[in-house]
Image: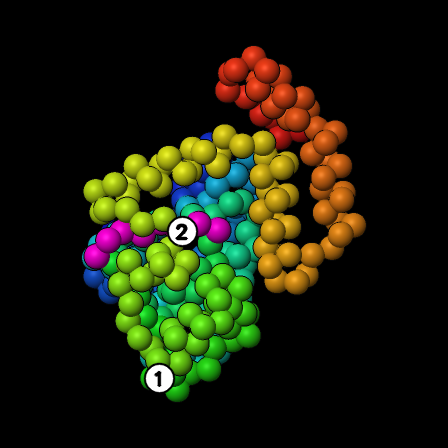
Amino acid sequence: MNGSPLLTMDGAVATITLQRPDKANRLTPDDLATLYAHIATVNALAEVLVLRLQSGGKYFCSGFDIGKIGDRLAIGFGTLVDALELARPVTIAVIHGGLYGGAVDLALACDFRIGVTGGDMFNPAARLGLHYYATGLQRYVERIGLDAAKRLYLTAERIDATEMHRIGYLTQLVEPGDLAMAAAKLTTTLAGMAPIALLGMKKNLNRIARGTADATEIARDCNAARESADLQEGRAAWAEKRAPKFSGR
């Protein structure tokens, strides 16, 4: 396993796997373009409700190739990360090891981040003389708060998984042996929700956090869910004490 990021599908679940474990899953310019295309592919598939980002080897990801910073790119790193945040499905970063540099923002763009004890992270931007792009700065402040964002950006401090969880970077922290089960449980839970409500609320929660929510669109999404066959199915399943069978209509 040593190549471009791989996209696989399994019903309502899509998985992107980073495949450069011998290079700590460092991302090349071509990888950025491939990841961006994978996200576009998944966005176009109405049946996909969950998108997982994972990798193999010792490290989750060491970010973008430092030697390529400043090069003209077909897809910029910030553009890719923003596309992941805006992805239509609910996203999960399955973080089995350390993550560094741009990978910290890549995982932060996901809706859920499951990490393991023994992991760590740091962002060496200030040490390299690199000023982060605006949406990356905003994402840190939105999701982990201003003080934590300053700590990570301005000091390039390395923090361990326990601290990552304490400041809210990790939404779940588990032992390494429990990661696969925890990721599978969350994936199954999300994939079992009513699609119209699930995807609409994911989109609008992110927009509210960023200050770009549109009250008219939220009302339209609420009405679409209220008039859906899935709401009727959900109510019936609740009354009958059974699992619902949603159709996305």
Cα separation between marks 2 and 1: 29 Å
x, y (%) of residue 34? 44, 58
Residue 195: name its quadrant: top right
x, y (%) of residue 209? 60, 59
Q: Residue lying furthest right in this view? A: 216
Q: Secondary structure at mark 2?
A: loop
* Image quarter of the C terminus: top right
For mark 1, what is the residue? 128
2 and 1 marks in contact (CB < 8 Å): no
Residue 236 inside the magenta-drawn segment: no
x, y (%) of residue 148? 42, 70
Q: Is residue 107 left or right of residue 199?
A: left
Question: Mark number for residue 137?
Answer: none
Q: Residue at x 50, y 56 (%)?
A: 84
Q: Residue at x 26, y 63 (%)?
A: 160
Q: Residue at x 58, y 39 (%)?
A: 198
245 to 134, vertically: above or below: above
Q: Residue lying furthest bottom in this view? A: 129
Q: Secondary structure at mark 1?
A: helix
Q: Earlier in the sequence, mark 2 or mark 1?
A: 1
The kind of residue tagged 2 is Thr
For mark 2, what is the residue? 171
248 to 40, vertically: above or below: above
Q: Residue at x 58, y 31 (%)?
A: 194
Magenta region: which residues?
A: 111-118
> Disc count in the image?
2
Foreground of the two, 246 or 174: 174
Q: Is residue 168 left or right of residue 121?
A: right
**Magenta stretch prevailing secondary structure:** strand
